[in-house]
Amino acid sequence: MIASLSHTKTQRQNLILAGFGLALLVVLLASLSLGAYRISLPQTLAILFDLIGLNVGDFQVQQANVLLQIRVPRILMAMLVGGGLGIAGAALQGMFRNPLVEPGLIGVSSGAALFAVIFIVLVPVSASLAWIKPIGLPLFAFVGGLICVLAVYRLSKSQGRNDAATLILAGVAINALAGALIGLVLFFADDSALRNFTFWSLGDLAGANWSKMPVTIVLIAIPSLLLLLNTRQLNAIALGEQEAFHMGVNVQRVKIQLLLFSALIVGAGVSMVGMIGFVGLVVPHLIRILFGSDHRLVLPGSFLLGAILLNFADLISRIIVIPAEMPIGVITALIGAPFFIWLIFNLNKSTN
Amino acid sequence: MLQASKVHFCIKQRPIVEQISLEVNPGEILAILGPNGAGKSTFFKILSGDISCKHGSVKYNGKTITSLKAKDLASVRAVMPQHSQVNFPFTVQEVVELGLISTQTKNSSQLINEVLNATNTDHLKDRIFNSLSGGEKQRVQLARALVQIWESKPFPRYLLLDEPSSSLDIAQQHAVLSILQKLKSRNIGILVILHELNLAAQYADKIALIKNGAITKIGTVEEVLDEKTLERAFDHPIQLLKNPNTGRLFVASAAPFYSSLATSKLA
């Protein structure tokens, strides 16, 4: 719309996004090829090209099975969950007008976890109900996440102003409450439910398989795309909700959409791979520090960088202690935190 | 025409805005004056559409405000807030561009350049908004509000400003208000809440004096700027002088060391 004026800017943005896309591709290929079971890069490519009927090299059937049945779904899952956490974090930060907001910090993740636990404990997984689990768990997590994000939003707005201290305190309170309620639910759980819960809470990306893909795509990829429709409105909200309304934005509708889609993404992510902190906070931050605040770039950039980061972390978790696996949350924090500190430190130095 | 008729607003049975009626014509500056807590800001929010009044109506070019969608309302009126904060590091250009968010126009780059020019902010366009001084921020916010209604349309547009000159130094105050004066020729009507009586005396075409939620007097500058009326409205002794250079009225106020009935209550 703003054609000639920001022509160079749009070009630059597209270039940045293309760069991220390329980096993601490199990480994906590395993730496909590396691991406890070695598949060389040419063989990896040969297997992938074989899918579309092109023969570019030889491989063994077992290699193809490992690649297509284990690694590809796992990598897709890491991409969707990491990207989803990144974009949801960016959207929530924009909506709350606060760069401190993170799905884990303001209680969305723990709310989602609480409802996931309630689902695991209350819905017995008998054979006849097995079909309900792949869709029921993420939907329950979504409801929990949504309740918490609404509660935090209400609390943080109650003094009329949207201030950071109240927001963080509300998040701490919600997190504590959700943690206590998880404990309470587990106290009443029977053995089989407890075992299910243990598997779920350990649930890292290793549990990814093709049967989880449709639900993940519907609950993460689609809301992520829908979030992208609100980027201009998010820019307006950054000036203030009232100002956004004055400029003709239907603020209420935009906010409801942002909350719904973010809660869907985080809820689905938590129910699939457990709570992975840090991505939703750091990724949008990095994008803003590097490329500015325009949400038209921050949101898609956060998705791509989140996908890169989580895949990279997953790759490390798989190859660092072969044949065992390091929990992925440990890796994201271990890579992310020092990098983030370094970045803040350098930024302060350059601005002084 | 922007028309408010018998606008009434209560909070807990207490009227904040009481039966206010006024009109703003395109090409005219209406200044709203009044002591703190008079209900100016509440009335302003009703006009801008942030809150809706319980009784009475607000009409833009004949259409009631409640029947207009946010987007349609944005095409007839722009609002400049008292002060606003931007929590993310946006550049000036990005902030001003946002004013066009609900406009479909092909000349956006031209509009933005014209507005940056008019507000004397073109040299700031690559700066980060939060790094600007108070006066610069106000001018950028003005540019952002202006770009929304800058393009010529077959219908008049309106600009609402809530104390645009508060916290600005003298030069900046006059800079902002002379920009407003230039808008009159663009078929734009302006309603502005002012704190500084002298700015109203110099720039306004009409003044509405509000106290306790109601209009005490509305009319031309000469009609409203009257010592008795102002003293009663502000509970403070006021002297009106004539500026020997411009011939315009000049409001002088001093510490209330001589007793008047109204101020002796405060002692």
Image: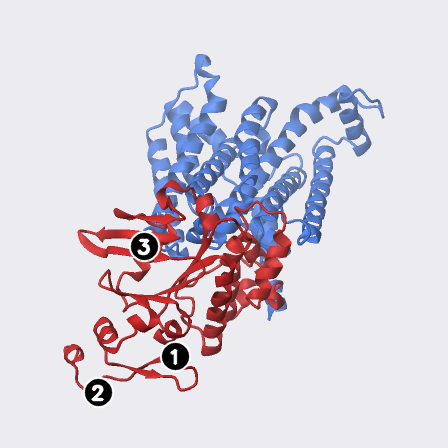
Closer to the chain start, of discs 1 and 2, is: 1
Mark toward the viewer: 1 or 2 = 1
- At 62% from the left and 36% from the top, the residue drawn is A79
Mark toward the viewer: 2 or 3 = 2
Left or right of B195 on screen, residue A283: right
Which chain is displayed in red in the rendered image?
A: B
Chain for numbered disc 2:
B
Chain for numbered disc 1:
B
Q: Amino acid at mark 1?
A: Arg
B20 to B237, vertically: above or below: above
Indicate the quadrant containing the C terminus of chain A: top left, top right, bottom left or bottom right.
Answer: bottom right
Image quadrant in which you'd find residue B84: bottom left
Which chain is displayed in blue in the rendered image?
A: A
Residue that label 1 marks: B248
Q: Which of the pair B258/A82 is nearer the observer?
A: B258
Residue that label 2 marks: B257
Contact flag, marks 1 and 2 (Cβ < 8 Å): no
Residue that label 3 marks: A159
Q: Which of the pair A132/B93 is nearer the observer?
A: B93
Contact flag, marks 3 and 1 (Cβ < 8 Å): no
Calculate the distance from the C-alpha at mark 3 to the C-alpha at mark 1: 45 Å
x and y percentages locating residue B97 in the rendered image: 57, 54
x and y percentages locating residue A251 in the rendered image: 44, 45
Calculate the distance from the C-alpha at mark 2 to the C-alpha at mark 3: 40 Å
Image quadrant in which you'd find residue A78: top right
Q: Amino acid at mark 3?
A: Gln
Left or right of A255 on screen, residue B8: left
